[in-house]
Image: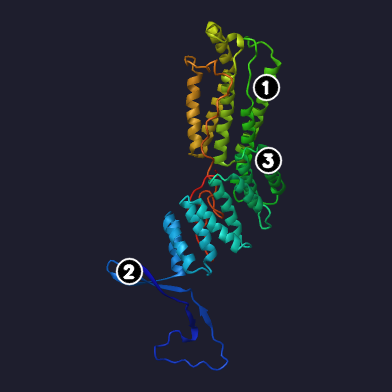
């Protein structure tokens, strides 16, 4: 049990410093006296197993202890100490930094809603500060973690109205806003947002250098994802006649539409790779390989001609499938070459992530499918006509976890003097 005794605001006269107990310093009338405002101290009586003892601590001690816990990846201890500081010392020079860092601590605990509360208080009470701007970015990211995409998109739209944004800020805000719109399946709006980010970057590229290319990579990658989604939405149909040589204008038109979308998505993924960010390059390389494999699967799952349905036509159907497999084998060959190139690139760059693992698995599977002895199972004709749903990809690359940090460093813990060293903080997905 802790019993609060008193709060001691320390105001000392510099002229008295160093004097013995009985010394008296006479200050001449009108002389200038320097007063030094010291941080407040809290003294509390703590009742423990061995009795009651006094504990003394000040705001600086609490702040430093909380910061050490956050740096050491002990977010629960950090959150407790920051909250105690804010409760016991609600209005000091540490308040803004403590609110921001408390938000980081709760992010480390994946308590996104409490983190939002801390960041919101900072943003509302200190609206004109740079810390408030960074707090708003954190709020938008926390809503994304909660998959509250409408509020996340709205938050980043509000950020874009601020007058104190630099180039990195604007591209990050547009990228995150577009990502939220993409998650809401509003592809057209998301595409416009991403294109606006590209237009803005091109307009300032010759004058201003970005501190990180991460969010520009996100923008380029997501443009490819939008086209990829449109590609998936086009359902192939095969010629109505059993012969693959038969010209079927409807089937040919649909195939052409799907092929155009494949090539457009491929170009956008290649643009992502050219940007040079290793994490987004690995994701884009994997997706290019997936495009060709998905087109192959689309053929396999397309409805077969009616004259091949039924048990009586099984032999004719097997011959048809065999011819189809030969015709579309090139798609698997393109896919495996792409995965191979992606793996070679990642090995050269020293990238180890889930996209690399996914490419390795796809490469091994395609090797089996391209083996002449491989027994490929086509879709059951009775259920043909619905293309397979693409499996969920690995998580998107991890963004810079905090404002003012880098992907490698994590967030910068706030210090009132802006001299706190960067510390590795809680990692967050974009999602």
Give the CA distance from mark 3 to mark 2. 60 Å
Image location (x, y in percent) of residue 312: 53, 5
Mark 3 Cα-neighbour bin, 10 Å: few <14, some 14–19, many ≥20:
some
Label 3 residue SS: helix
Precedes in sequence: disc 1 or disc 2: 2
State which quadrant residue 306 falls in: top right
The residue at the point 58 percent across, 50 percent down is 140
Badge 1 crowding class, 10 Å Cα cut-off, few under 14, some 14 to 19, many 20 or more, is some
How far from the left and from the top, in percent, is residue 253?
A: 70, 20
Query: SS for tag 2?
Result: strand
Q: Residue 47 got which mark?
A: 2
Local crowd at mark 2 within 10 Å, few (<14), some, or many (≥20)? few
Q: CA distance from mark 1 to mark 2?
A: 78 Å
Q: Secondary structure at mark 1?
A: helix
Query: In the picture, residue 62 is in which quadrant?
Result: bottom left
Q: Determine which residue is flagged by label 1.
A: 254
**Picture quadrant of residue 195:** top right
Q: Residue furthest right?
A: 203
Image quarter (top left, top right, bottom left or bottom right) of the N terminus: bottom left
Q: Nearer the viewer, mark 1 or mark 2?
A: 2
In the figure, 245 relative to 76: above or below? above
Front-most of 147 and 320? 147
The answer, for residue 306, to whether it is visible in the render is yes
Q: How is the image coloured?
A: rainbow
Q: Quadrant of the C terminus?
A: top right
**Residue 331 rendering spot, x and y as whole percentages:** 58, 22
- The residue under label 3 is 189
Instruction: Please report the residue visible at 49 percent of the width from the left and 58 percent of the height from the top.
Output: 102
């Amino acid at each position: 049990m802790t019993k609060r005794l008193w709060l001691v605001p320390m105001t000392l006269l510099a002229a008295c410093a160093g004097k013995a107990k009985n010394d008296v310093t006479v200050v001449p009338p009108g002389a200038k006296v320097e007063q030094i405002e010291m941080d407040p101290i809290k003294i509390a009586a703590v009742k423990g197993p061995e009795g009651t003892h006094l504990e003394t601590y000040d705001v600086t001690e609490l702040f430093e202890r909380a910061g050490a816990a956050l740096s050491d990846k002990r977010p629960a201890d950090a959150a407790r100490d920051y909250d105690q500081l804010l409760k016991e010392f609600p209005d000091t020079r540490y308040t803004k930094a403590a609110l921001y860092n408390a938000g980081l601590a709760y992010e480390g605990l994946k308590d996104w809603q409490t983190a939002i509360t801390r960041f919101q208080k900072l943003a509302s009470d200190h609206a004109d500060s740079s810390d408030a701007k960074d707090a708003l970015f954190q709020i938008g990211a926390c809503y994304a973690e909660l998959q509250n995409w409408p509020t996340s998109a709205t938050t980043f739209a509000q950020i874009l109205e601020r007058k104190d944004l630099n180039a990195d800020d604007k591209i990050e805000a547009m990228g995150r806003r577009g990502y939220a719109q993409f998650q809401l399946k509003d592809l057209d709006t998301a595409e416009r947002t991403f294109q606006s980010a590209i237009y803005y970057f091109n307009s300032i590229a010759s004058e201003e250098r970005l501190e990180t290319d991460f969010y520009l990579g996100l923008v380029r990658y997501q443009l490819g994802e939008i086209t990829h989604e449109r590609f998936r939405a086009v359902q192939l149909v095969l010629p109505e006649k059993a012969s693959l040589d038969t010209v079927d204008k409807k089937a040919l038109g649909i195939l052409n539409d799907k092929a155009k979308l494949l090539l457009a998505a491929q170009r956008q993924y290649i643009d992502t790779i050219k940007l040079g960010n290793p994490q987004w390059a690995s994701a884009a390389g994997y997706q290019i390989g997936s495009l060709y494999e998905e087109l192959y699967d689309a053929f396999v799952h397309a409805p077969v001609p009616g004259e091949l349905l039924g048990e009586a036509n099984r032999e004719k159907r097997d011959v048809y499938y065999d011819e189809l497999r030969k015709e579309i084998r090139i798609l698997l060959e393109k896919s495996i070459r792409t995965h191979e190139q992606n793996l070679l690139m990642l090995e050269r760059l020293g990238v180890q992530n889930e996209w690399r693992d996914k490419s390795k698995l796809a490469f091994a599977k395609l090797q089996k499918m391209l083996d002449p002895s491989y027994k490929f199972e086509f879709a059951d004709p009775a259920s043909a006509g619905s293309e397979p749903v693409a499996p969920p990809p690995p998580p998107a690359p991890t963004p810079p976890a905090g404002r003012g940090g880098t992907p490698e460093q994590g967030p910068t813990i706030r210090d009132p003097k802006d001299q706190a060293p960067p510390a590795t903080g809680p990692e967050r997905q974009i999602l």
